[in-house]
Amino acid sequence: MELFKTPNFNYIKYHKLFFGVSALLGLLSVGALVSRGKNILSIDFTGGTLIQGYFEKAPVPMDQVRAALTDAGLPGAELQSVPLHNAFILRFKTKQSDADRQGVETKAKEVFAKKFLENPFVVERAEFVGPVVGRHLMGKASLAIFFSLLGIVIYVAMRFKNWIWGVSGVFALAHDVFLATGFMAITGREISITVIAALLTLAGYSINDTIVIFDRIRENIRLRGRANKESLDVLINRSCNETLSRTIITSLTVFLVLICLLVFGGEVIRDFALALTFGVVVGSYSTIFIATPMVYLWQTKRTQSLR
């Protein structure tokens, strides 16, 4: 514990090492995303077969339904239960053809007949449904994200009176979101609306963590830089060390909650918790080891060019 009471780490000195680690993780993410292609997208984006039905006699837990489908060679189905009617809505990623739809429907009916002998599953409808997130909505979402990032850059640039801070903060944010997406691809998970929600949550967490450290750097530049004439790298290292305990405590508390969600939350929110668990770790890393060294390098280069 003494280590975190008076830390004195030199973060700027090893910035090349940390940039290299991020570059390696980025390459792994690109490789995973390219190798999986469109298969990484869930039926929210691709469309698929929807089967709606109910169990005649008694409710069946969702975990048992999911396990039965996995045993039948139909993993990755999206399940939605309607407890009052013993009903389930099952969504499978398939092509838009009668053969694919009928094949999935037949498999599902057969496995339910075997697993739940005395509780027949009655199919009310089976059809191909289009993607929930269409091209039009994706275009609107892309524009919203673009203008949100632009707004963050403008706000941070105005607050710190320098565009370098805003661009560095947004770069760290994009770094975290991209690596979290790559992590989902590497672990074999699909990108669904739930994962998108986790990535947007991560973006908010990441930029907030970055702004806290940026604000401490600004205060140290104002108070210590003028009085003691300390160099920028010394001020940045001092600021990161002063906020290190806050960063660790905040990240650790969020991390513990997410671990609980992963273990006890069930399959429905597992992707959300998994993306955020990795994102919190990489978000805390990027604030100290990516965003602040970028500010130092750009600011130093700009100062030298003005001389």
Image (spheres, rainbow, N blue to C red):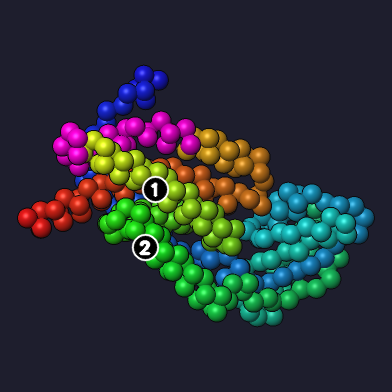
The residue depicted at 36 percent of the width and 23 percent of the height is: 5
Name the image quarter holding the N terminus.
Answer: top left
Mark 2 burial class by Cα count in 10 Å: few <14, some 14-19, many 20+ = some
Label pair 2/1, CB-CB below 8 angstroms = no
Instruction: Give, as a three-letter code, the residue at label 1.
Output: Ile
Instruction: Measuring from the top left, give residue 196's x and y in whole percent.
Output: 54, 60
- Residue 29 visible within the image: no
Instruction: Measuring from the top left, give residue 266's x and y in whole percent.
Output: 67, 46
Residue 241 magenta-drawn? yes
Instruction: Give, as a three-letter code, the residue at label 2.
Output: Ile
Please give the residue where the numbered disc 2 appears in the rendered image. 154
Q: Is residue 140 above or below residue 254?
A: below
Residue stretch in magenta = 226-250
Q: Is residue 141 above or below residue 188?
A: below
Mark 1 burial class by Cα count in 10 Å: few <14, some 14-19, many 20+ = some
The residue depicted at 31 percent of the width and 41 percent of the height is: 219
Please give the residue where the numbered disc 1 appears in the rendered image. 211
Identify the main secondary structure in magenta: helix
| SS type, badge 1 | helix
